[in-house]
Image (cartoon, rainbow, N blue to C red):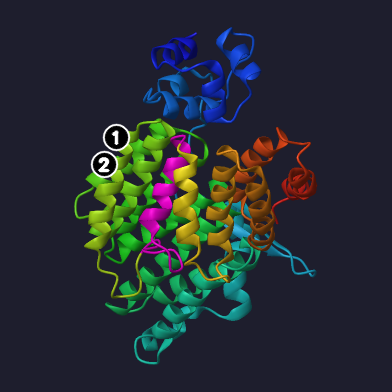
Amino acid sequence: MELRRLRTAAGLSLATLAAQVHYSKGYLGKIETGIKQPGVDLARRCDAVLGAGGRLASLVDQPAPASPPAAVAADGDGEVWVMSMAPDGSSWMVPMPRREAIATGAASLLGLTLGAPRSASAAAAHDGTLTAFRSLFAQVRQLGQTTSPSVVLPMVTVHTHTLRGMANGAPSPVREELLGLAARYSEYAGWMAQEAGDDRAAMWWTRNAVEMGAAAGDTELATYSLIRQALITLYRDDAVGTIDLAQQAQAAPGTSPRVQGLAALREAQGHALACDYDNCQRALDRAAALLDRADTSNGMVIGSASVSGADLNSLVAAWCLHDLGRSREAADVLDRQLSLVPDTAHRTHARFGARRALAYAAAGDIDHASALATKVLDAAELVDSATVRQDLKRLARLLGRERDHPAVREVHPRLNAALRSPIH
């Protein structure tokens, strides 16, 4: 086995390696003799300890990553997503062929009920309407930090529809301003759809954002859509797809330093999945330089230049360190950065808090990992995130190896219950 060869070349005993990767000597022995097949998490830890540069992780058999969902064209014969609302307050989105939606009246339901918004478009630039919608956008994004996508998506859907309707027939440059703002709402709807666990809807909303942005003269949303797709491949553990999409975004002509910086961060995460420390670090350094040059003065930037008070570059670096098998270093960085995040930023605490709990568990600090898991679950239950649940599943598997530990016995039932709950 390659593990035995690398361990022997490094001059480590099986017991020493087992202690450093926080697995039992007997378990590693079975892997070296071929009785057990390692998981990618263990392979990455061994890569880090043995300085193997991802060689062991590349040997682990993993399911072929699924292709990212194709963006759905929003042409006349394409699809629309229709929002339905029940009397109990629940809502859901369903895809429907555009012609069918028109035939049933679903596509114009809001217009029929509320009145066509285009009648207000001519005055939009003069009566504070655009200013109000920009302010609402900031509030919606803030709300997205504190609650479930099921609360945010209906609002974003209505605002996007309203702005797009107001743009119809409006004179330039009012039309471009309205479409540009609608595009930002639509892009955020794509993020919330992904958080709700619906990658297909996420790409549909992102594609609509790209089309409206292009109509408004904003071509950068097309580049940012590559970063959104790269996030989907990242959560599917597709390192190659993530790196490729992120590099395409960086190479797109006319891309601002901000979006290039965000793409470089995504590329770093892809390299970390591939256990490529050197290229990961280069991408992180490039991202830091680009984001330092970014102009965020207009307040309507794409994505997040910072994460609720913390440094985005540092948070992503810690994310990468964990995937690279350097979990103790990752935990230290996350401790510092999450201490800067307001308690009200539940989505940030859930996402990066889950990573911090994972890092402590991987580093062998089961007591602290279990205590952190309780805090993460408090935040995760509020924001109801499908992407956070993926890390919670990994955490459940890690802690499940220590079922007899008192702290694990206390938190594991709640962790399992959270994973069984459906995304709303």
Residue 278: quarter of image: top left
**Residue type of the residue flagged with mark 1:** Asp
Query: x and y percent of residue 132 in the render?
Result: 45, 85
Q: Which mark is residue 282?
A: 2
Q: Does the magenta segment cover residue 304?
A: yes
Is mark 2 in CB contact (under 8 Å) with mark 1? yes
Instruction: Note whether 212 is above or below 249 in the view shown.
Output: below
Give the distance between the C-alpha atoms of the residues marked 2 and 1, in whole angstroms.
6 Å
- Most foreground residue, 106 or 150: 150
Q: Is residue 10 visible?
A: yes
Pointer 1 residue: 278
Mark 1 secondary-structure assignment: helix
| Residue drawn where x is 72% and y is 35% of the image | 402
Neighbour tally class for label 2: few under 14, some 14-19, many 20 plus, Cα within 10 Å: some
Residue 310: quarter of image: bottom left
Q: How many marks?
A: 2
Neighbour tally class for label 1: few under 14, some 14-19, many 20 plus, Cα within 10 Å: few
* Figure quadrant of the C terminus: bottom right
Magenta span: 302-325
